[in-house]
Image (cartoon, grey):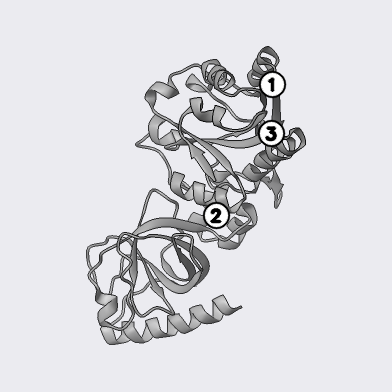
Amino acid sequence: MTTIQRIQDLARFPAPHHLAIGVFDGLHLGHQTVWAQAALHARESGGTAILVSFDPHPRAVLSPGNAPPILTHTHHKLRIAARLGIEAVLIVPFDRDFANRPGDSFVADLHRHSPGLAEICVGRDWQFGHNRSGNFTRLEELGRHYGFAATGLDPLVIDGSPVSSTRIRELVGAGDLGAAKRLLGRDYSVLGTVVAGEQLGRKIGFPTANLAVENEQLPPGGVYAVLAALKEGELLPGVANLGRRPTVSSSGESRLEVHLLDHSSADFYGEIMEVWFFQHLRPERKFAGLDALQAQIREDALEARRALGS
């Protein structure tokens, strides 16, 4: 997959260009219908389909104090895009200056630097430009002016409601991972960096990788059967604790700790790890001491193996 961060670099891709534009937080099934339309038309024309998204999430710039957790930060989004077979991505840097530009200016830049721009494909409710002044009707007008097709898709409906990042975020936050999976088309995952912890897990025979995630939505606290991957390697079975670790800590700090079932070490400091939440096993609770905690982790590991094996 080729990723660019300058609109000027669109000229590197073979024309005609079919752009699928959106924030695409989560790259859920609704987003994938927008991409699929652009990809289909690119194949028919012999051109290139290009996913166009923004970094950071616009809400982090426009309303930093009120921005909700996201489903996928940019690095995570690019991983998922590669798995979907997306070969070309433009990540547009989003800052205050960009946010204050008229939407017409953004489209004009795309036309200027995309030789043979054939199509811009978006969700029909997509808005763009300063104060969201641009909408699909305006995009159609600009398409007629510049000579490209504007394609707007209605929201995908699953289980009686439109698929949206907000809806998935709420489902994950409520712990309904099965419903979230139906809208995403995959098990929900987070991506983070393995950081050093107190190495308590190693002392009791269950070494853990402590994951520092960005502002991604997490499910409710508890113990989960998970699958994990380092870089883009094989999927590894594991059991994860998401919570405040009341048996061993009084700080109140929430952590995501992953014990890989078939690894005796967790020396992955600095590595990027992706963790898929497969099944909730039990709530987090406080134990009388380390012996009781150790016995419960042993049971959790067995239960995780059963869940993942099924």
Looking at the rendered image, the disc whose residue lies closer to the viewer, 2 or 1, is 1
Residue type of the residue flagged with mark 2 = Leu
Q: Position of residue 120 (x, y in %)?
A: 65, 28
Residue type of the residue flagged with mark 1 = Phe
Asked if residue 51 lies left or right of residue 223, the reply is right
Q: Nearer the viewer, residue 101 or 1?
A: 1
Query: Crowding at label 3, few (<14), some or many (≥20) Cα neighbours within 10 Å?
Result: some
Q: Tell me if residue 73 can be seen.
A: no
Looking at the image, tell me whether mark 1 or mark 3 is earlier in sequence order: 3
Give the labeled residue for mark 1. 148
Give the labeled residue for mark 3. 47
Dot 2: element:
helix
Q: Residue at x 34, y 37 (%)?
A: 65
* Mark-to-mark CA distance, 1 and 3: 14 Å
Give the labeled residue for mark 2. 171
Query: Crowding at label 2, few (<14), some or many (≥20) Cα neighbours within 10 Å?
Result: some
Q: Position of residue 150 (x, y in %)?
A: 69, 25
